């Protein structure tokens, strides 16, 4: 278990370049399984989860040519589907959430697929019903071995169908979409998730020859085609990382420019930070956050306490609520953070309370934060990162606290943030990695 020693209390100054989006990369890499032709992907983040998925594909026989740390060409010419029944696959696939998205492409191309219950953050129940009910609608059958936690799927004669998803699942929509593009007939997916991750996946599939309409909406219509070809695809900057940097800048009163953010793809994220009182300028495609001594949380029009809650896109992503929560601890005013989607993602507030934050955990989904308006700085402490986003929120807290904090289990942060210590140290942070 690796650790960060963080010597906080210093404002940072400089430029940050966001990495490619983790959640988009996981979908896009799985989509390379849909064709025997080469697919080149640019702006791949060099992070644990993505590297593990690439290894998984190599295990299946996909040829991967690395041109640089962020660009690879994938060629899924000879895929060994039986590899998915091996222990090696089961162990590796169970370590990441993204592995579940190999199922859709394999089912469509080879008529069968296997998957262990995937890993990812332990942030509450993470059911997969949407994925499997969708495959079932296309005519696939599945069996879930509860003892082994292992899914087996057959889909030799799948046929396009209409489906109304039971929830707008991000990975579920991606998985069904990837199956539908090679399934004969028309598939209509209503209540589809439509995050930029899915818009990007859809655009990539279209450039491979797929027929998809409704991209960017919650109603996707797919005309199945017989085969797909290769393409080149560039991954968008990671909107969660960009949001994390905005929160970091505000909390540490730093002067930070985030370069090339693809602003139109950030949706409601920038305005949500503005409601927290954080000022920033958009210059071209960069976001500049000047040092701010005070930031004051807005109220609703009637003067009642602001709620920051997650919702499927174009609502606010749940992956940034931990960052909003930590930022609120030094704001002027109060906010209710309502994490509707996940039930175990707010427990890390215990650590912030230890550091001196004023937070009331109302229930597993809701926390009220009463900001200090910087009248009391957070105190440094020793903590353990429970999940990727709580991990980064604790890192932000530690960077704002004067003195030495220790964060254990930073593998969680490394799952989704590329060389975060190196990049923040380059603009004035003092983070030491102890392996
Ligand atoms: C690898 C990847 O891409 N992971 C992301 C993906 O996970 P993932 O695709 O696993 O998450 P889902 O979209 O399936 O659902 C996440 C949770 O939200 C609940 N839910 C979902 C939709 C809805 O309309 N109502 C609702 O309550 C689900 O029951 C589940 O508990 O999407 C999540 C939700 O944005 C993000 O947190 C994850 O970072
Ligand atoms: C929950 C997340 O990731 P995963 O779905 O991979 O666990 C996240 O990125 O915040």
Image (spheres, rainbow, N blue to C red):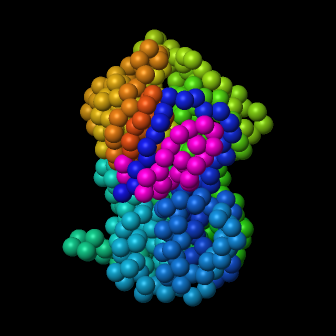
Residue 286 spot, x, y in % from top left: 72, 38
| Most distant residue in the top direction | 303
Q: For the point 47% across and 16% down, which residue is it? A: 373
Q: Quadrant of the C terminus?
A: bottom left
Q: For the point 56% across and 54% down, which residue is it? A: 418
Q: Quadrant of the N terminus?
A: bottom left
Q: Give the range drawn in magenta.
A: 408-435
Q: For the point 42% across and 61% down, which residue is it? A: 97
Q: Magenta stretch containing residue 74, yes or no?
A: no
Residue 138 spot, x, y in % from top left: 46, 71
Q: In this view, does 342 lie to the left or right of 234?
A: left
Q: For the point 63% across and 80% down, which residue is it? A: 75
Residue 151 spot, x, y in % from top left: 34, 74
Q: Magenta stretch containing residue 429, yes or no?
A: yes
Quarter of image, res 85: bottom left
Give 417 or 286, whichever is nearer the viewer: 417
Give the tally of numbered discs.
0
224 versus 435 height, above or below? below
81 versus 425 height, above or below? below
């Amino acid at each position: 278990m690796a650790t960060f020693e963080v010597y906080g209390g210093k404002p940072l100054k400089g430029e940050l370049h966001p990495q490619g989006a983790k959640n988009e990369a996981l979908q896009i890499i799985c989509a390379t399984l849909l064709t025997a032709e080469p697919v080149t992907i640019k702006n791949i983040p060099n992070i644990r989860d993505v590297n593990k998925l690439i290894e998984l594909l190599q295990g299946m026989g996909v040829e991967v040519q690395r041109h640089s740390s962020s660009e690879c060409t994938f060629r899924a010419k000879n895929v060994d589907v039986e590899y998915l029944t091996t222990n090696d696959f089961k162990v590796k696939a169970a370590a990441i959430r993204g592995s579940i998205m190999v199922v859709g492409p394999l089912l469509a191309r080879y008529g069968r697929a296997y998957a262990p219950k995937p890993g990812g953050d332990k942030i509450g129940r993470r059911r997969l019903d949407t994925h499997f009910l969708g495959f079932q609608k296309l005519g696939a059958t599945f069996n879930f071995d509860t003892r082994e936690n292992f899914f087996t799927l057959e889909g030799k004669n799948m046929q396009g169908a209409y489906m109304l998803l039971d929830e707008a699942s991000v990975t579920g929509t991606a998985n069904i979409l990837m199956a539908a593009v090679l399934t004969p007939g028309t598939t209509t997916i209503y209540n589809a998730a439509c995050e930029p991750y899915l818009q990007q996946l859809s655009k990539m599939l279209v450039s491979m020859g797929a027929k998809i309409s409704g991209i960017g909406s919650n109603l996707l219509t797919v005309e199945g085609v017989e085969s797909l070809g290769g393409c080149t695809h560039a991954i968008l900057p990671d909107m969660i990382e960009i949001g994390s940097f905005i929160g970091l800048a505000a909390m540490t009163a730093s002067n930070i420019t985030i370069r090339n953010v693809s602003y139109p793809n950030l949706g409601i994220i920038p305005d949500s930070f503005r409601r927290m009182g954080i000022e920033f300028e958009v210059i071209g495609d960069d976001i500049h956050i000047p040092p701010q001594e005070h930031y004051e949380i807005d109220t609703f029009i009637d003067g009642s306490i602001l709620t920051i809650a997650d919702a499927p896109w174009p609502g606010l992503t749940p992956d940034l609520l931990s960052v909003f929560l930590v930022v609120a601890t030094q704001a002027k005013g109060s906010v209710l953070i309502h994490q509707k989607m996940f039930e175990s993602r707010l427990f890390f507030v215990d650590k912030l309370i230890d550091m001196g934050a004023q937070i009331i955990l109302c229930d597993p989904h809701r926390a009220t934060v009463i900001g200090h308006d910087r009248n009391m700085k957070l105190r440094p402490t020793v903590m353990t990162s429970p999940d990727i986003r709580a991990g980064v929120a604790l890192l932000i807290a530690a960077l704002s606290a004067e003195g030495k904090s220790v964060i254990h289990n930073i593998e969680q942060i490394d799952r989704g943030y590329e060389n975060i210590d190196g990049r923040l140290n380059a603009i004035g942070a003092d983070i030491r990695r102890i392996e």
